[in-house]
Amino acid sequence: MVRSDAPVRVLYVDDQPVLGELAATYLERYEADVTLEVVAVGNAREAQDRLGGSHIDCIVSDYEMPETDGLELLEAVRCQYPDIPFILFTGKGSEEVARDAFQVGATDYMQKGPGTDQYTVLAKRIHNAVSQHRAEATSEQYGAAIEALENAVYVLDGEGRLTSVDDVFLEMTGYDREAALGTPISALDADGTLSENFASLVDAEGPDTVQFEADVVSASDEVRRCRCHLTARQFTGESAESVVGVLHELTDLQYYDGLTDLILDTSTTLMSAEADEVDTKLRWTLQSVAEYVGAGRATVFSATEGGDVTSVDVSTGGLDVSVGLEDIEKTHEWCAPGITPADATADGCAGAEWWLDQFRRFENVRVESLSSMPPEADSLRERFERQGVTSLTAVPLVSNWSLCGVVEFASHDGERVWSDREVRLLRTLGDLVAQTLERRRREREMARYKTIIETVPDGVFLLDEQGYLTQVNEAFASSFGFDADDLTGRPFLDLVDEGCVPPDIADEYVEGIKAMLSGDREKNVFEVEVSLSENVETRVYEAHTRLLPYEDSFRGTAGITRDVTDELHHRAQLRRQNERLDEFASVVSHDLRNPLNIAQGFLDVARETGDDSYLDRVEGALDRIDRLVGDVLSLARQGQAVGETSQFDLAQSIFRTWDAVETFDASITLTGDLGFATADETRFSQAVENLFRNAVEHGGHDVAIDVGPLTDGPGFYIADDGPGIPPDRRDAVFEHGYTTSRGGTGFGLSIVRTIVEAHNWSVGVTESADGGARFEITYQPAETDAPPVEAESVK
């Protein structure tokens, strides 16, 4: 038997030696109750050689490797080592790879990620896998001993030498433990029968189990006739096969032999039951044992889902009675024909406190006659009388020093005696039932948490089958303006009634459940708009839901919600940017090609003629190219997301921009108060600068510019007294590459529109009071008490 705190030897398989060395370094530094010892190899062949030559507790393998990949290695390992923990640790995994890995027999699956924190997670998974494996090995050896119950139990190695004996064996044979260990089975064999059956069992063609009668010689040469039971066992974690032996003196009653064998059979049945088989096999167990002991009814009362009935402080002998009868209920039962079933719960029956109080102390209840029940149990006795019960025995179900239920056998054929040995055997059965139910509870709990963990760590919620929120985290609750405690236990439809989510979300949720129950999809993904109030921006959440593990009926869903509002805005912005790039890409290719052709043509003429005057034409074409490239780069930059915004005085910002622009003899006049705005001021200044350049370019060096507030809403205008823009061309002027100036690039006003729209503002053009162009920009004003800038004129 391997100690639980023994070092864990890990075989790490990766075709990249550096990664193997890095993993070994971090895994061996993992601080836990056990030490990880890592052996790194570079391929599947080396891994199989290591497995054959040394003890390995866990295998961690990459997926993509030359010659033999991780799944093929897993298949090969499972042929020789069906139980050794195997973790697939891959950098290029997928749901399909994970599914295939678990189908072949992987213990766990984990994708590689950036950084070294992943090795801490991997170390924890190795630790959990090996701990569970060792616990199962210990349980298996314990189970082999349990099969003997009150008989003498011993273990033989492959050579027939005693490697383990129990106290009953020592008492029966007269050996002390030190003298017994290492003794050959032949020393106990009076007539050769023991040795003969052992030889047939270890033979490759022999049976797995043999039962026979033989004369056994004690240390004092006393011969006892015994029924013998030998079973070949391959204990998990041990390479050599062992033989578990049982000696049963034939002086005992055959009744107990039969009950012992029956419980042996039921223990095998229960220990091998899958989670979805437990109910069926447990009912079969109750029927088989009840019929054998002559009981008309066998019932299991279990702790309610989510907790134990009570826990005992074993150090002080204290008793916790804070949880009462209402916390246990009938979960499994077998009744003979015509027998009245037990009540679903003992809640409301005061006399049952006497019944429960003994189980809280981990004591058995034995009632050979209802008249022997104490006065405080009168109401319970009356209940038994109504059900036709005449005697009963019940044993507690105990797991991890906690009471998790009761198994009760009731007789309806008159008073009867329940012997000490009979009750002890039923108590052994109770232990097996408790272990089985606890194992299923843990499996259900692990499946429940695994469902949650597999989802992204944003808002997390659990909905039961009736649509109540049974568990939420703070991220989920805060997205609706609640605390987690306030939202837990409420119907999800309350969020619809309060206007937080639209009504049609309930239909979407139900349709998703139907699709998952029918197998059409594994999870349901949909978007939810959450509105907390008119003054708060509506947020969009992407919801992922999965079914909670269930057996016979739907049990609810687990889900996560992720705020995708900003992501959707970003996608829309990228889509607009791509549209803009598509629009001006063709313009750029055409406009650049023309000056390039001009420059190339006049350069060739200059070379052929030697006339340097043609180079002036080349220089002009290159200047044109330079302006085009500059404007294209500017436009590309303006298509990026808005940077950090701040509140600023519009008039002051406009005057600073005017001072930075070459305006020749042009003049600017500010009329009225522009107020304040919140924006990326650097990009705002770029837009205003382009409007000033446009006015000077089309209105002449002495153009007069007027700036003032709009009268019909928040915003301002920039007007000039130039030639203006015809009505049929006012939409086109904002398009990439559109220009009416011979030297213009056609990107100035396009950049203005890009910057304005990036702020969720708008821009338009109309005719000014002087017949020129008037550009109007509307925006959301900023609230401030700062004094306005006085109207002035600048030249």
Image (spheres, grey):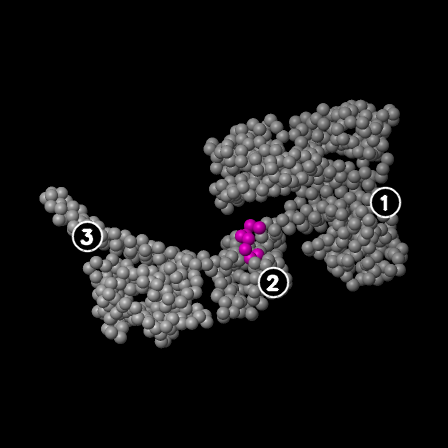
* Quadrant of the image containing the N terminus: top right
Question: Quick check: 753 left or right of 621?
Answer: right
Numbered range of the magenta stretch: 453-460
Residue 612: give x, y in percent of width and height: 13, 46
Q: Earlier in the sequence, mark 1 or mark 3?
A: 1
Give the residue at mark 1.
Answer: 420
Q: Is the magenta stretch mostly helix, strand or loop?
A: loop
Question: Quick check: 638 left or right of 156?
Answer: left
* Residue 598 in view, yes or no: yes
Give the residue at mark 2.
Answer: 483
Residue 454 in magenta? yes
The residue that appears at 13% across and 49% down in the rendered structure is 613
The residue that appears at 82% across and 46% down in the rendered structure is 423
Local packing at callout 3 (Cα closer than 10 Å; few below 14, some 14-19, many 20+) is some
Local packing at callout 1 (Cα closer than 10 Å; few below 14, some 14-19, many 20+) is few
Give the residue at mark 3.
Answer: 620
Residue 744: give x, y in percent of width and height: 23, 59
Residue 43: give x, y in percent of width and height: 51, 31
* Residue 464 in view, yes or no: no
* Front of the two marks 1 and 2: 2
The local secondary structure at tag 3 comes to helix
Q: Earlier in the sequence, mark 3 or mark 2?
A: 2
